[in-house]
Image (spheres, grey):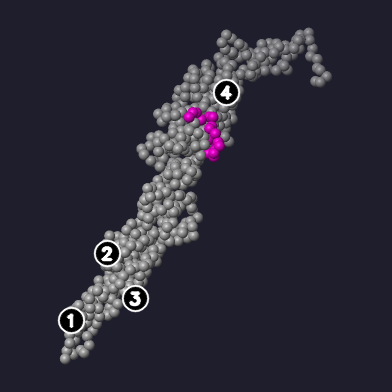
């Protein structure tokens, strides 16, 4: 007699004495099935043996299980619960896949190794590489490994939702510290599963394990209102001193997996801006001219930032006396945070002027905050470059002789230019009228040589000229305003004090309000020069004509003879 095939079996050929069993991973509830198509797949699940007669024999993990992994570390899923998971010998090829929203997603979530597929296992699974997934909750989807869809090779095979995979770690954000100041409140980092036991390290470049030698500092974390989703970041009370730029904050969980001290597994937590001016910038100002620090480059510079020239930006150095109060320049003209800004001594509409010897200083930066007022020398402790104060040195003196070409040579200073202009005035910067008998202006015609400059003033007239002292007043060619060096009042700096003296053969004749050169009379000799006087020849001697220069021109008078001394 013939009997129908039992549930879990089928027979499609005539004359067979045995029924075929549905394959592992399939079940059949019908009796007397004549087609293999009656063996229904377990939809991503598996069965312990062939010939399953109901969906209850499909082995599957329990739903709504919860697991935790940490971004930046290896992710191991262990202790997966489910009927017959451990006892069955048919599920060694099962795998899991994390998906962003549901197990119906057509692709794995990003950050779980290249393909998103775990290693094979029963109740324990892992990904071969450290995960880089954004901290969040993901659906953990299971594949039994014997489906019709080429095992677990495609995302659609991972259709069984077994619960939530919570990935802990920080959500990448942006923090900021001001260079030269304590960074005890860099901002807050949000995320999932954060703890005050976590570690944040400041690094240049990347958070790769191989980049550990670039550690620049370590932050402490403080939970906000006992929340595991928001922490405050602090680098303590020590002033941050580093090259300005964009760094990375690398995070390590202190609660999950290997401790940070023994095996540091980092994950990118935040970009952090070390704000302030970049080092190495040079700025030139000139004495006697409006001064501002032009186009200082940096990171996130803002209006109100300050720059003070000092001999050194190290702690303990004092203000420079030559810098007018309040001793610093203030940034102005920016709209928000900028990468380049001007710093003005005084105010941006009327910059301050420097009247001092030229020199070179360090530019030292400070940003006023609630904790740092930036009004003491010690607040300015971060170097931003070099501030050059150009122009001629003070207290230089020269003599020119009336009636001869006047060439003032050897003027020394810093950054003197071949197009600088000098003007003889009674007093620099006072708007004095031109001196009588002198041309109005002289331009520098010689080139800079070995740090010195020569000013050719032409010939000072002997007839009609006056014995006098005047200031050779200087105005720099590279000036804040293109309208400078046109008015007497703009020649504020003395390049030299020039004394006009009588030539040999003349003496100073003092008139009512001025001094002129008078030809030396007969019987006198006149050496000329500063304070030129007429000296009478010795008794019994005289000169043969006017204009004698030395005593050797005094000869014996009539009735006298020249007597030589024993010493010649």
Q: Position of residue 462 (x, y in %)?
A: 58, 17
- Residue labelled with disc 2: 103
The quadrant of the picture occupied by the C terminus is: top right
- Which region of the structure is painted magenta? 310-326
Residue on which disc 3 sits: 87
| Measured Cα–Cα span from mark 1 to mark 2 | 33 Å
> Residue furthest toward the bottom?
1
Query: Which sits in the foreground, 17 or 302?
Result: 17
For the residue pair 541 and 534, the one nearer the viewer reads as 534
Q: Name the residue: 50% across, 34% down.
A: 376
Mark number displayed over residue 31: 1
Disc 4 to disc 2, C-alpha distance? 91 Å
Q: Residue at x 40, y 49 (%)?
A: 223
Where residue 298 sits: x, y (%)?
A: 43, 42
**Residue 461 in sight in this render:** yes
Tag 4 residue:
497
């Amino acid at each position: 007699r013939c009997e129908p095939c039992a549930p879990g079996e089928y027979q499609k050929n005539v004359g067979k004495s045995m029924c075929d069993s549905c394959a592992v991973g399939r079940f059949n509830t019908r009796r007397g099935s004549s087609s293999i198509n009656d063996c229904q797949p377990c939809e991503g699940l598996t069965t312990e043996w062939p010939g399953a007669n109901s969906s209850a024999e499909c082995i599957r993990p329990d739903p709504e299980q919860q697991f935790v992994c940490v971004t930046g570390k290896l992710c191991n899923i262990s202790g997966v619960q489910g009927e017959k998971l451990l006892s069955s010998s048919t599920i060694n090829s099962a795998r899991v896949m994390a998906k962003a929203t549901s197990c119906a997603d057509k692709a794995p979530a990003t950050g779980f190794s290249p393909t998103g597929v775990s290693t094979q296992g029963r109740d324990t699974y892992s990904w071969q590489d450290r995960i880089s997934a954004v901290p969040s909750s993901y659906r953990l989807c299971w594949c039994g490994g014997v489906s019709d869809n080429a095992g677990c090779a495609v995302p659609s095979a991972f259709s069984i939702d077994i619960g939530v995979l919570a990935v802990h770690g920080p959500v990448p954000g942006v923090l900021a510290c001001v260079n030269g100041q304590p960074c005890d409140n860099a901002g807050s980092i949000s995320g999932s599963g954060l703890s005050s036991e976590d570690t944040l390290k400041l690094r240049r470049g990347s958070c790769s394990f191989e980049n550990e030698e670039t550690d620049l500092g370590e932050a402490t974390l403080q939970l906000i209102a006992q929340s595991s989703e928001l922490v405050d970041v602090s680098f303590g009370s020590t002033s941050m001193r580093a090259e300005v730029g964009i760094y990375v904050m690398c995070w390590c969980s202190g609660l999950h997996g290997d401790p940070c001290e023994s095996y540091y597994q980092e994950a990118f937590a935040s970009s952090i801006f070390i704000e302030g001016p970049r080092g190495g910038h040079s700025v030139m100002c000139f004495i006697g001219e409006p001064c501002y620090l032009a186009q200082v480059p940096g990171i996130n510079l803002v209006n109100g930032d300050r720059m003070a020239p000092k001999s050194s930006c190290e702690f303990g150095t004092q203000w420079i006396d030559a810098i007018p109060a309040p001793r610093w320049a203030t940034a102005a003209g920016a709209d928000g945070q900028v990468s380049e800004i001007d710093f003005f001594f005084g105010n941006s509409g009327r910059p301050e002027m420097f009247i001092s010897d030229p020199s070179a200083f360090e530019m030292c930066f400070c940003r006023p905050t609630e904790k740092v007022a930036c009004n003491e020398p010690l607040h300015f402790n971060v170097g931003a470059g070099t501030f050059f104060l150009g122009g001629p040195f003070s207290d230089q003196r020269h003599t020119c002789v009336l009636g001869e070409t006047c060439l003032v040579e050897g003027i020394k200073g810093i950054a003197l230019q071949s197009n600088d202009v000098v003007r003889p005035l009674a007093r620099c910067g006072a708007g004095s009228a031109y001196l009588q008998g002198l041309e109005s202006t002289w331009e520098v015609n010689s080139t800079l040589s070995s740090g010195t400059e020569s000013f050719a003033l032409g010939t000072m007239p002997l007839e009609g000229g006056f014995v006098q002292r005047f200031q050779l007043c200087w105005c720099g060619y590279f000036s804040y305003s293109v309208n400078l060096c046109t008015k007497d009042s703009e020649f504020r700096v003395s390049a030299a004090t020039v004394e006009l003296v009588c030539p040999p053969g003349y003496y100073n004749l003092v008139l009512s309000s001025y001094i002129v050169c008078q030809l030396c009379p007969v019987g006198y000799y006149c050496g000329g020069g500063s304070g030129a006087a007429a000296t009478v020849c010795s008794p019994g001697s005289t000169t043969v004509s006017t204009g004698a220069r030395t005593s050797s021109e005094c000869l014996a008078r009539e009735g006298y003879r020249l007597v030589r001394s024993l010493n010649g």
